[in-house]
Amino acid sequence: MRHILPVVFIALILLAGGVAAEAAPITVADFSGSEVLIDFDSLAQFTNVTTQFSGLGVTFSGSNVVTPASGGGNQVLNVTGSLRLDFSPNMDRGGFDYVAAVGQTITLDLYNASGVLLETISGTDTSGFLGIARTGSEVAYAIIHDGGLQFSIDNVRFENVAAAPEPATLVLLGTFLGVGAFVGRRRREMN
C-alpha cells in the first residue's frame, strides 16, 4: 500500500493541474440555458440600477440609469464610462448586449475577490454581444468601460458552470491508478 501512495499523489497533482483556469470569448449560444438573464424591463425608466437584482446574484455600481431601448423594452445607459457588476456567488461565464458610439471600444475586465485582474476582452463594433467564459468560478466582479464616454448595455447574462476535469485528465488519472494497482499486485506475488 505504501508503494501505491506516491503514484496516487502524482495522479492527484496531475488532476488538479488539469483544471487550470482558461478564458475564451463566447456568444449567447454558449450559455447553458439556465443562466441568469437581466433585461431591465421590470424597472421604471430613469431608475438608477444598484441592488434591484441582488436576489439574482448581481449588484451594479457606477452612474447608470434605465432608458428605453431602440428595439423596445429597457436598457441601462452608463454616462461615466465605467460600470461595475459584483457577483454573489462568483461566476465563470458572463456577457451582455451593448451599444456604443462609432469608433468606441467597449472593454470587459474580470477580477477575483482580491482585486486581481483575471481577463480582459474588448468589442469594437458599435453594437453587439460581448461575453467571456473563464473556468474556475473565481470572477467576483466585472468592470465594463469605454474610456470615459457613454454606452448602454442590455440582456446581461451570467452563470456558474461547475468545473469538471477534462476527459484526458481522467484518462491519465485512471492510467496512473491502474499502473499503481498492477505494480502493487506484482510485488505481492513476488513475496
Image (spheres, rainbow, N blue to C red):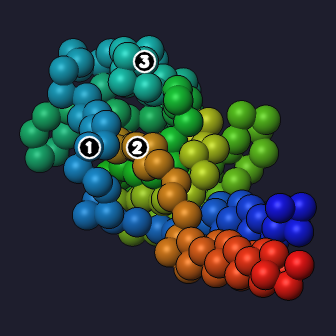
Name the foreground residue: 35 vs 43: 35
Q: Answer left or right for 182 relative to 124.
A: right
Looking at the image, can residue 151 be seen?
no
Type of amino acid at the residue the image marks with label 2:
Glu
Residue drawn 71% across the image and 34% down it: 113
Distance from the alpha carbon under mark 2 to that under mark 3: 14 Å
Distance from the alpha carbon under mark 1 to that under mark 3: 17 Å
Distance from the alpha carbon under mark 1 to that under mark 2: 8 Å
Type of amino acid at the residue the image marks with label 3:
Ser
Binning the other alpha carbons within 10 Å of mark 3 as few (below 14), some (14 to 19) or many (20 upward) gives few
Q: Answer left or right for 42 relative to 83.
A: left
Q: Quadrant of residue 134?
A: bottom right
- Image spot of residue 33 (x, y percent): 23, 50
User: Mark 3 or mark 1, which is nearer the start of the sequence?
Assistant: 1
Residue drawn 60% across the image and 52% down it: 136
- Contact, mark 1 vs mark 2 (Cβ under 8 Å): yes
Q: Answer left or right for 4 relative to 97.
A: right
Residue drawn 89% across the image and 61% down it: 2
Name the foreground residue: 131 vs 159: 159
Q: Which residue is mark 1?
A: 34
Where 43 falls versus 90 (above or below)? above
User: Mark 2 or mark 1, which is nearer the start of the sequence?
Assistant: 1
Residue drawn 89% across the image and 78% down it: 191
Quarter in which the N terminus is drawn: bottom right
Which labelled disc corresponds to residue 159?
2
Binning the other alpha carbons within 10 Å of mark 2 as few (below 14), some (14 to 19) or many (20 upward) gives many
Q: SS of the residue at dot 1?
A: loop
- Image spot of residue 3 (x, y percent): 88, 69
Where 33 falls versus 191 (above or below)? above
Q: Which residue is mark 3?
A: 54
